[in-house]
Image: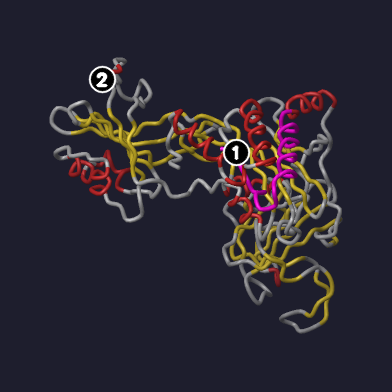
Amino acid sequence: MDRGSNSPADRSASSAAALSRPESSGRVGLLRRTLLVTTIGLFAGAAALGMVKPDRADLPAARQIQSLMPLSANQVHVSTDTSAAPFISETRIRSGDTLASVLRRLDIDSPGLLQFLTRERSARSIYKLYPGRAVQAATDAQGKLAWLRYIHTPGEENDGQVTTKMLLVTPTQDTYAAREISDSTDMQTRVAVGTIRSSLFGATDEAGIPDSVTQQMADVLGAKIDFLRDIRPGDQFRVVYEARSHQGRYAGAGRLLAVEFINKGKIHNAVWFSADGKSGNYYGFDGVSLRGAFLRTALKFSRISSTFGMRMHPIHKTWTGHKGVDYAAPTGTPVHSTADGTVEFAGWKNGYGNVVIVKHYGEYSTLYAHQSRIASGVKPGVKVSQGELIGYVGSTGWATGPHLHYEFRIDDQPVDPLAADLPISRPLEPEEARQFQAATQVYKQQLQLLTHLQQTLPESSTNVASR
């Protein structure tokens, strides 16, 4: 199915195909049809529910669109006379494509166009053809080029506004003109469910969840779940997130809105809430903020190479206490602060090598050692936020290989960060709590519906997403 298609017929065909598959028969088929009807009103943007692949799936080489697809009014003049509507063709760039091959697939034979595109500096964005991106061409009734556009940046965020950027080429009296334009994108809400079989990213890929949303899941729930060592086959998740589209085409993922993750039989959840409509934070459905709670790890994904406690020192060959946890990772892997705080020390410290020590509220502090280098601007007195970059994995000081040595301290005394009860943030004030309950009720309903879906689906069909 061409995901770029936006016609009602194409959408109807997509829905019919999803519901006519063998796995949709019987009780499961009835559930999916029922869920589809409910989803139209509840999820405002989900068109059908079924097994899907990630958005990077192969697409047909080219397609033709018989209807008018106008640009914004300030970008190009489009006649309101439907008889004068241009005939628009579209192709997706393939690996190894050249401008000449793209124009051939679009059946464009405009004198001097190829030379213009390859030499004109104002058209330089088309010098780089990104596989999967779209090129569209409009021709009039005589077959003459009306405009050509290359959608090189499907979704770009700037100050909260997500736009699609493209190159627009139009013919002039003697040659052509090229300029960069932007068009607004539409926000949709998407949902997905999945079951871990081997890895988190494997399950989210199967459910069609973008990697950026998966990373947000790990970041948001990182204080409750150690995604390095706690994930088990059979763990389940339900997700509600934002997605952007441009003229019906996926243009990028947005914010994670709500997530429920069942890890080793225990339910963990998070929901986005903004009291002022601008700044916001993630909370559990109990109204307790997840922001400010310590993350279990300072690396996104790695493996533990040495735990807290007694061990044989790898260099000194003596039996000694290990005051932190070591995470093996390639040199240059980003290191992130596990909580808000102020940098207390940043520099070289004996066997620690390049080390950053962050002082948090109250009696808590954290230490990050053996870094290859410390991030720019990280120095004593600088405030850092939870998840903020503070350095990069290395093997400086007393280290036999690249890894991060991480210590969690209470009153300057190291404790095991994998076993400690990490501090949590304060609950909402009464008035804030009322706003929170009203604003997040819809997400609670969505997750409940997804739970019902996941419990009813056969095991082989538990990774699904709305589209």
Magenta segment: 442-467
Disc 1 is placed on an element classified as strand
Asked if residue 77 lies left or right of residue 307, the reply is left
Q: Is residue 37 visible?
A: yes
Q: Which residue is mark 1?
A: 49
Kindly identify which numbered label has been placed on residue 98: none
Task: Compare residues 265 and 217 and report the one nearer the observer.
Answer: 265
Instruction: Please report the residue visible at 70 percent of the width from the left and 40 percent of the height from the top.
Output: 27
For badge 2, the amino acid type reads Ala
Considering only vertical position in the picture, is 164 above or below 228?
above
Q: Is residue 257 visible?
A: no
Asked if residue 351 lies left or right of residue 421, the reply is left
The x, y position of residue 251, in whole percent, is 48, 38
Where residue 285 sits, quadrant-wise, is: top right
The x, y position of residue 419, in whole percent, is 85, 59
Asked if residue 185 lies left or right of residue 431, the reply is left
